[in-house]
Amino acid sequence: MGIIFSRVFKNAWILSLSNAIAGSTLPLMHLAGTLAGSSLAPSPDWATAPIALMILGTACSVIFVSKIMQRYGRKKGIYSFLFLGVMVCFLAIMALQLQNFSLFCLASFALGAFNATLLQGRFAAMESVDLEYRATAASMFMGSGIIAAFVGPEIAIIGKDLFSAAYQGSFLLAIFCILLSALLLVLYTPPTMLKAESGNPHVSVKTLLTNPTFCLALASGSIAYIVMSFIMTGTPISMHEIYHHSLLDTKWVIQSHIAAMFLPSFMTPIILRFSGLRGMMLMGLACYCMAIHIGYSNTSADAFWSQLVLLGIGWNFLFIAGTTLLPSTHTENQRFKAQSVNDFTVFSFQAIAALSAGWALNLIGWQSMVLLCSIPILIMLGTLLWERLKTYH
């Protein structure tokens, strides 16, 4: 493991730390955006709309972000969208000042492009090291999110009452985080292979989808986000407004959940060595099943904490397994197309899950909503079995 502290991992470290600082904007939005959206929304059914629109913005911009990076390189592409992130935070501040729900939703949607850029960073980190170290680089990058997990909600609470409108100060603090991230990125040197790359040969989506292993990688990332987003988006409203747990308890649950999403990354290379990618996917599904059981049977603050921690661990296992499996399903020159198809699909499903969370919460209640998550889990189990039969038959 000492290799990770060598110059081989220099770029991976820079990208990971830069992502951790800028990425604090996203858990900030998950907490502040949901609660602010609840107060601004015309009806409770639309309380989770800002989060859903941020995810929809991610899905809609993934292909565009990928093309920008393919044409101008990872570094210039990341800088462009960091600047966009600053502008979006200013727009959110204006929306909160005007108490304009539509404008706040627009800011949330635009923040999706910023999110898509940060997510592309995991591929940049993997490309900066040799093939044998790519799983470790991906784990490092994802593990850095633990910093964002605590910084984001903290600055959401610290900035909540800095100005007349709630959470304006939170987004101002987010701007400083993005600028600090941009300064750190100066040290990043893109690999020569990315600069020298010529145009990619055409590969259709249909061709990619004929590969069962590509479908498995796609399903692993999609199911990871569907279940996680559906439950996580509804948690702040369910805890704070339905079951009347304190804002501090709600903040702690969200912080713990996001930390649990990224903390297992430090053990992922070891887990992969013993269980393999598909074994790790099964471990993620097992965590999801336990989270569903707890969420269905108990609504105490401690139960919410246990449920969301298991949800975070399950997401980590499924998402990293899918991300690590993806490069083996396409050629090097097809990576931008495969990555954009993967992320577009994953975050489209996440957007649907997040948008439907508020609707489901009001229509069928928290416990029934949690129970619905058993459906995508069964789909993922079916995909694992199908891929094994197709690949090893």
Image: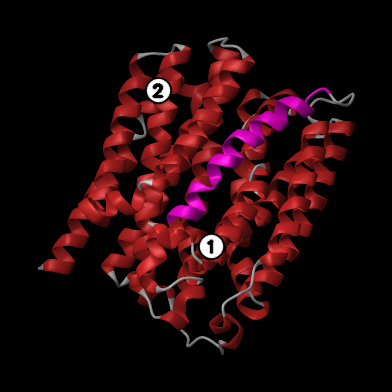
Under circle 1, the secondary element is helix
Foreground mark, 1 or 2, reads 1
Label 1 belongs to which residue?
12
Q: Which mark is residue 72?
A: none
**Relative to 381, residue 251 above or below:** above
Point out the image quarter for the C terminus. Answer: bottom left
Label 2 belongs to which residue?
306
Instruction: Classify 10 Å Cα crowding around label 2: few (below 14), some (14-19), many (20 and above).
Output: some
Q: Residue at the location (17% across, 68% down)?
A: 391
Amino acid type at mark 2: Ser
Q: Relative to 308, is 19 on the left or the right?
A: right
Whether residue 190 is visible: yes
What's the colour scheme? secondary structure
Check contact, mark 1 vs mark 2: CB within 8 A: no
Under circle 2, the secondary element is helix
Point out the image quarter for the N terminus. Answer: bottom left
Q: Residue at the location (84% across, 45% down)?
A: 90
Q: Residue at the location (59% across, 60% down)?
A: 15
Q: Return the residue nearer the eye: 168 or 297.
A: 168
Give the x, y percent position of residue 236: 58, 24
Cα separation, mark 1 vs mark 2, equals: 31 Å
Compare marks 1 and 2 and give the one earlier in the sequence: 1
Q: Relative to 44, is 110 on the left or the right?
A: right
